[in-house]
Image (tube, rainbow, N blue to C red):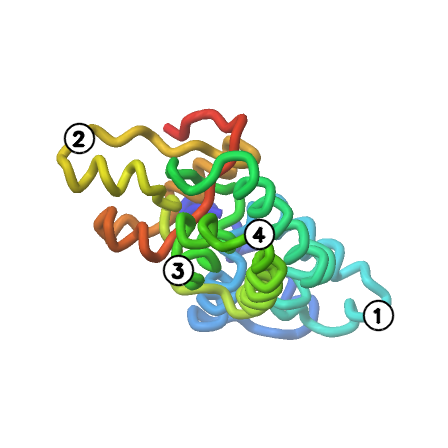
Amino acid sequence: MTSNDRKQFATALTDVLAVYGRETSKGVLRVYWEALKHYDLSAVLEALSRHTQNPDNGQFAPKPADLIKLMGGTSNDRALIAWAKVSKAIGSVGGQNSIVFDDALIHAVIHDMGGWPAICQRPEDELKFVAREFENRYRTYLFHQPQSYPSKLIGTAEMGNAQAGFPVDPPLIVGQRETCRLVYKSGSRNESAPKALIETRKLISGGAHAA
């Protein structure tokens, strides 16, 4: 979601919580927003509707984790899907180019694991351990959203060009174009290219250039 969606999100959440006799405050709305802001508004609204119709969990007011589960299946499913994107990118492109994924949590996890080029340089026989660490971190972020994430995952080419004062190519995108644009727009750009390179990762073939 973007800041433009915040009013509609707040209205919808307030209406649903009212069904359960719960009043909302600015603090409550902020907690829900921080937990769910990385998802599309349409997906959040659909999850709210589905929760109210659930004969089991729907008897209680929805918590952020309830809505996240409805939007993406189990945490295990989502973590495996996310790693599949990363694994494909490692094999098809490598760590030279900068990229943007259509999943902000991938950016956050890769940032925490040392950066895209560092991941790409891991020996093939170590990737199963890398995958396990990635999936565990990803599941954690599903229920404890990161405070920030890098707008793009910087590759070695951008780092070298930035240090030398040469032009930097736009990042490649991986996944749905519009979602990638949202991830890029909402991410942090406060880091310099060299520092971000150390803390970000990922690349994939077939992607268009992000605007």
Using the image, determine if residue 72 lies above or below residue 132. Answer: above
At mark 3, the secondary structure is loop
Q: Nearer the viewer, mark 1 or mark 2?
A: 2
Q: Determine the residue positioned at 38% across, 44% down.
A: 152
Residue 89 can be seen, yes or no: yes
Q: Residues within 10 Å of mark 2 (few under 14, many from 20)?
A: few
Q: What whole-number distance in Å separates the C-alpha atoms at marks 3 and 2?
A: 25 Å
Q: Determine the residue positioned at 42% across, 63% down.
A: 112
Q: Sequence-wise, which precedes: disc 3 or disc 2?
A: 3
User: Residue 82's x, y, as percent?
Assistant: 61, 51
Q: Sequence-wise, which precedes: disc 1 or disc 4?
A: 1
At mark 1, the secondary structure is loop
At mark 4, the secondary structure is helix
Residue named by callout 4: 124
Q: Along the horizontal axis of the image, is 120 left or right of 47?
A: left
Q: Along the horizontal axis of the image, is 49 left or right of 110?
A: right
Using the image, determine if residue 97 lies above or below residue 209. Answer: below
Q: Along the horizontal axis of the image, is 95 left or right of 17?
A: left
Q: Nearer the viewer, residue 114 or 188?
A: 114
Q: Nearer the viewer, residue 210 or 203?
A: 203
Q: Nearer the viewer, mark 4 or mark 3?
A: 4
Q: What whole-number distance in Å separates the C-alpha atoms at marks 1 and 2?
A: 58 Å
Q: What whole-number distance in Å separates the C-alpha atoms at marks 1 and 4?
A: 44 Å
Q: Which mark is residue 166?
A: 2
Q: Which amino acid, by three-letter code, is at mark 2?
A: Phe
Q: Nearer the viewer, mark 1 or mark 4?
A: 4
Q: Sequence-wise, which precedes: disc 1 or disc 2?
A: 1
